[in-house]
Image: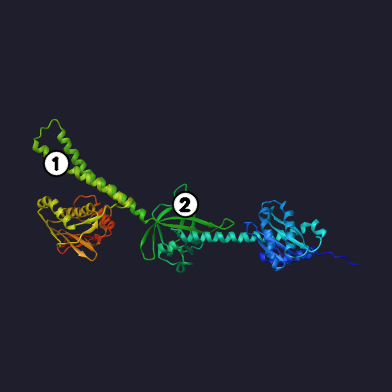
Amino acid sequence: MSTYSPDLSLQIDLKQTNINDLSTNLNDLISASGGQGGILTTWGSENPEQPQFVTCGVPIQSKESLCAELASFAPEIASGDLAAISELQCRFETEAIREKLGGLNAVVIPVVASGKPLGMFCLLHRGEVPGFVKESPQIYNLVADHLDVVLNNAALLQKLLRDRLWYESLLRNAKDGIVVVNMEGKIVGVNEALEKLSGWKVSEIVGQPYYKIFPLQFTQARGTHGQKQNSLALSKSKNILDFAIFQDPLEGELTARSGMVIDVEVSGVTVSDRRNKICGWFMVLRDITRRKELERMGKIFLSAMSHELQTPIAVIKGFAGLLSDPELELSPEVIREKAAVIYDEGDRLQKMVRQMLEATSIQAGGIKLHCEAVSLGELIERALRRFEAMAAQKQVTITANYPEGLPAVWGDPSRIEQVLTNLIENALKHGAGGYIEISAAEEYSSILVRVSDCGPGIAKDEQGRIFGMFQRGSETKVRGSGLGLFIAQAIIEAHGGRIGVETAPSGGACFYFSLPKEQ
């Protein structure tokens, strides 16, 4: 008489990585142990509150309730509370009776891998559970080992995908241009920021020599003693383009596709393989055009201010020393004359300092306006009265030309008057005598104001530049800070208007600005 002896040797392919294949292994395990059915519950390294189930031999109508029982105990077993297994077995057998599955015995064994519970296996038997199953629970280690491989591989794949998405997002959303170059000096890839900076599309340049697509001219010396220097040749032609890679970034000039030269800051690192062999170069190009412009303006500021401040300070100091000299006896008329000069120069110095502070405030946070309905006619008439004496002294006639009933504008009256005053002062300083005309007229939803003179005018290539900080016409001989038009532009633009200059019919300069009508 032959004795029933189940085959305990399960053949499991550890190369399988699909967790669905565990159902086949589960069926083999149930058959080997002589059971009726079984449920494998897994949560791996994920939340045990949301386990996954693989069933075999369990009626469909009972699957939901039996899996719910296992799910309710998953957090306890995942936390290492193995004492809950006995209670789970009793609850499971009770639930089987309630589901009218007959008298079923259950064996629940935690699936442990790397010392950590990552699931549990429930074996269902119609009769008494075979002794060899109770006495040899190590047969489940075969499933546990395979499950460990599956879950670890899945976790590794998920990590790789997350890392890839993270790096792709980092490169795609980086504000700086990024280019990867191989050892042959050919472009492997670039990000969107570098496409915008250079004007080249990635589909056009991949595989092209780097030095042809992104020609760089460094403005800093390379090879400073003590700096890390790993050279990477980016060309194999006779004229090898050999870039040194330093700890500190280098400043240079990049010629874009359009031919425009862009100031950039370059940082680079070599890319090495597992054997530490250099296989390419990873480079970051940062557009520093704005920074270089600020540096240039700072230098112009120091130069302009040192020159412009020197004259009034010298005059004030000289005349003050003259008046304070005890050995000189000056008439009251001379004293008043020198004091008037000191006052005028002090007033000029105060105006320059005020303009510098205002320009700094504009750069920091713009201009604050206190708007109301403003009559431009009244502001123009007030300006005529203010400059009447100065115009007569310079033998200049100032006229106003605007229609009656000119609509009011919406703006800050003191700021608008500041702009008008600056333009008239410039016309008196730079004009060649004759006349100055101030006109105003409606233009769609705005009022356009013009201040024209009969001076030498402003060259067309300078008409846009003179509204920058510390900018003045190349032909002017009159002293000034170069801030007046910069401030005037900021004021008008803060009102939502526009300002500019063109050549007047007389050949002089015609400055104009527009302001929105009062709604």
- Give neighbour class at mark 1: few <14, some 14-19, many 20+ (Cα, 10 Å): few
Location of the C terminus (image quadrant): bottom left
**Residue 15 visible in the shown view:** no
Q: Identify the disc placed on residue 340.
A: 1
Q: In this view, does 435 lie above or below 301?
A: below
Q: Picture coordinates of residue 207 (x, y %)? A: 49, 67
Q: What residue is shown at x 74% (from left), y 57% (from top)?
A: 108
Q: Picture coordinates of residue 442 (x, y %)? A: 20, 64
The answer to which of 62 and 268 lies nearer the viewer is: 62
- Amino acid beneath label 1: Ala
- Give neighbour class at mark 2: few <14, some 14-19, many 20+ (Cα, 10 Å): many
Tag in front: 1 or 2: 1
Image-quadrant location for residue 253:
bottom left
Q: Picture coordinates of residue 206 (x, y %)? A: 48, 67
Mark 1–mark 2 CB contact (< 8 Å): no
**Total marks in image:** 2
Relative placement, left or right, of 295 versus 233 is left
The answer to which of 80 and 477 lies nearer the viewer is: 80
Relative placement, left or right, of 256 versus 226 is left
Q: Identify the disc placed on residue 456.
A: none
Location of the N terminus (image quadrant): bottom right
Secondary structure state at the residue bearing disc 2:
loop
- Amino acid beneath label 2: Phe
Q: Picture coordinates of residue 156 (x, y %)? A: 61, 59
The answer to which of 501 and 321 lies nearer the viewer is: 501
Q: Which residue lies furthest to the top in this view?
A: 326
Q: Distance between the residues labelled 1 and 2?
A: 60 Å
Q: Is residue 413 above or below residue 257?
A: above
The answer to which of 60 and 340 lies nearer the viewer is: 60
Colour pattern: rainbow
Relative placement, left or right, of 276 versus 231 is right
Q: Provide the residue designation for mark 2.
A: 246
